[in-house]
Image: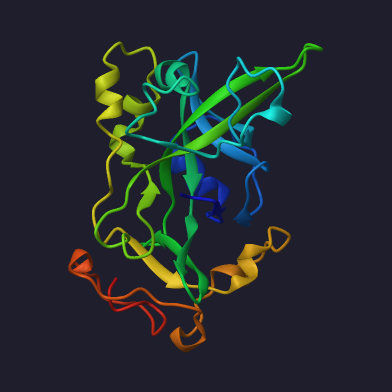
């Protein structure tokens, strides 16, 4: 489950990483929440472009959004066969530019948020699906969701799912919905290797979507955490911590 994420990387760096044509700058966002506008990258008429869409996927066949569950994630293992996602998997794949995301470790003591981001501090492309929903009055809205995979060994001690990260060299394969070999795109949806991401505990302020500032991603001392992951054999491949708040397991 990926329920909140950030996009704090500079606009020019994001545009260069995803090679899209737009040049419109955007502000840093530290607490992107479901139903909010989000940026995606998609290919339209063979041109890679960015677009603003609502985070919360609505299949085109939905008649009343108020009676339809909010879809912010799709499981990569089943998206190609689910009625809600089957068409978008074939025709409307996209990428979410993401600087990092939040995940909550659930324990009897409570839920502790962790900020998970690339160890090199860069941006990453997360697989997504988009759809245009039309209302009865003729208006329309583009919506999208993130795709998830089983967590790798490193992150599984926090949560059993993680975003489906696509490597830059595979962007064209994922975005090329004109390619009849859909299996090539589906094969990219797999857990990313250990060591690419760092995880640090952060303040529970992130629980409130009204907060959107850089303090949300600042690590907190382990002694202030509601809970910390317990060591396990699954987390045996570790990267060296960068700070005292970086868990030794990571």
* 156 versus 138 height, above or below: below
Please tell me which residue lies in front, 90 or 233. Answer: 233
Residue furthest right as drawn: 137
Q: Is residue 155 above or below residue 128?
A: below
Using residue 76 as the reference point, say whether residue 239 is left or right of it: left
Numbered disc total: 0
Give the image quarter of residue 180.
top left
Residue placed most toward the observer, 196 or 201: 201
Left or right: 239 in relation to 214: left
Residue 182 to residue 53: above or below: above
The one of 121 and 220 positioned closer to us in this rendering: 220
Q: Which image quadrant is residue 63 in?
A: top right
Can you give x and y, in whole percent of width and height, for residue 176 in the image?
A: 37, 20
Residue at image coords 36%, 42%:
164
Q: Nearer the viewer, residue 53 or 74?
A: 74
Residue 76 in the image: x percent, y percent? 36, 34
Quarter of the picture containing the C terminus is bottom left
> In the picture provided, is 170 more to the left or to the right than 127?
left
Q: Residue at x 27, y 41 (%)?
A: 190
Residue most toward the bottom? 223
In the rendered view, how is the structure colored?
Answer: rainbow
Taking the spot 54% from the left edge, 74% from the top edge, the residue there is: 218
């Amino acid at each position: 489950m990926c329920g909140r994420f950030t996009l704090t990387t500079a606009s020019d760096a994001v545009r260069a990483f995803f090679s899209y044509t737009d040049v419109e700058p955007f502000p840093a966002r530290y607490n992107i929440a479901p139903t909010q506008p989000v940026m995606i990258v998609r290919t339209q008429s063979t041109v890679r472009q960015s677009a603003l869409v609502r985070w919360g996927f609505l299949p085109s066949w939905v008649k009343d959004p108020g009676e339809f569950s909010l879809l912010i994630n799709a499981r990569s293992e089943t998206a190609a066969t689910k009625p809600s996602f089957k068409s978008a998997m074939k025709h409307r794949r996209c990428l979410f530019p993401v600087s990092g995301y939040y995940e909550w470790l659930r324990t009897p003591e409570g839920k502790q948020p962790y900020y998970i981001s690339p160890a090199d501090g860069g941006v990453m492309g997360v697989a997504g699906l988009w759809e245009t929903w039309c209302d009865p009055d003729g208006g329309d809205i583009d919506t999208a969701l993130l795709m998830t995979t089983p967590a790798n060994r490193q992150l599984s001690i926090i949560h059993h799912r993680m975003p489906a990260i696509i490597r830059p060299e595979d962007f064209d394969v994922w975005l090329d919905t004109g390619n009849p070999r859909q299996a090539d795109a589906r094969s990219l949806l797999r857990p990313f290797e250990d060591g690419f991401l760092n995880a640090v505990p952060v303040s529970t302020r992130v629980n409130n979507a009204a907060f959107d500032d850089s303090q949300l991603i600042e690590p907190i001392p382990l002694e202030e955490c509601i809970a910390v992951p317990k060591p396990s054999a699954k987390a045996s491949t570790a990267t060296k911590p960068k700070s005292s708040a970086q868990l030794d397991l990571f």
